[in-house]
Amino acid sequence: MTMSRRDRFRLRTQLVEALKGDSWSYERINLLLQDFKVKHLDERYDGPSIAEIVATMPDSTLVEAYSIVLDLEPAEVTDIVETNVNTGNWKPGYLRLFLSHSAAHRKFVGDVADELAVMGIHGFVAHDSMAVSKPWQTQIEHALRSMQAFVALVHPEFNASTWCQQEVGWAYGRRIPRFAIRIGTDPAGFIGSHQWPYTDGNEPKKVAALISSWVAGLEKLGDSVVDGLLSALSEVGDYYSAEAAAKRLVTLDRLSDLQFNELDRIWWSNDQLHGGVLPTRVMKPYYLRNGRSWPPLKPDEEARP
């Protein structure tokens, strides 16, 4: 695992804070440090502090010590780190959604991913979402470690695919939000214990709508959903895509003032938005309903006293 400076600092800080808690005595801390063969605390307090000792730990030791002190499995710590990193083949700013599917329907799933992109959701499609120069299995594993949500598109070939079953296992093992759509058959195994929605699988737009509606209802991913929708809106290249992205965004009950300010900036940064009748027709009532001025204030207007 490659750890960023931000993640390393976060783990170190949380580890130091935990070790300074009431449940970690001087003797208990040293017992832990001895096991990792790193510097100990000096009973006369002449030696290095807890923070100084933790700062010298290599990443592998840091992860293991963190898992012991905070009572987690090392794999869980790895997941915590990798889930918060926008690296690899994920599109920055978009919600990271793994689309598990049988290879026979890759074209259809790719079309679903295209529809989701307009809504600020990056649907990872094996092979379509991967860099040619990198090992494909490594990229799939990274996507499974760093995904924020998981969707199984269950065509008749899905249940017989060992790859699909392994991907479902990853989602359950990581305890992330899971969803399935029945497209010709019912899912087998653990994921088959729920009554999932059914569609005939001929309309990528309909499947994408089912997925985005489910994602929008996930409270723990609320900020990621908003960030993804704003990113999608900022990148639209035509009026029709702008209208579609705007329609998805206005389904949100409310944006914070900071999010509205970012939306103001995005609106004036893209002429497909402020110059389009279609997105204007969607966005204007949403602004007025939320007590915001229309048209949105331009960034230079907001700065004026």
Image (cartoon, rainbow, N blue to C red):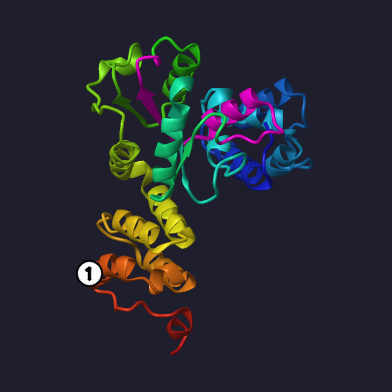
The image position of residue 8, as x and y in percent, is 66, 42
Does the magenta portion include 277? Answer: no
Quadrant of the rendering where the C terminus is positioned: bottom left
The image position of residue 203, as x and y in percent, is 31, 36
Direction from residue 215 to residue 84 in the image, left or right: right
Q: Is residue 305 placed above or below 170 in the rendered structure?
A: below
Residue at the location (42% across, 38% down)?
111
Does any portion of residue 102 appear in the rendered image? no
Extreme residue in the bottom direction: 305
- Which residue corresponds to mark 1? 285
Direction from residue 252 to residue 227 in the image, left or right: right
Q: Is residue 101 placed above or below 237 in the rendered structure?
A: above
Rendered image quadrant of residue 197: top left
Q: Residues within 10 Å of mark 1 (few under 14, many from 20)?
A: some
Does the magenta portion include 144? Answer: yes
Quadrant of the rendering where the N terminus is positioned: top right
Amino acid type of disc 1?
Answer: Pro
Does any portion of residue 294 appear in the rendered image? yes
Direction from residue 138 to residue 93 in the image, left or right: left
Q: Which residues are magenta?
A: 129-158
Q: Is residue 245 placed above or below 265 in the rendered structure?
A: above
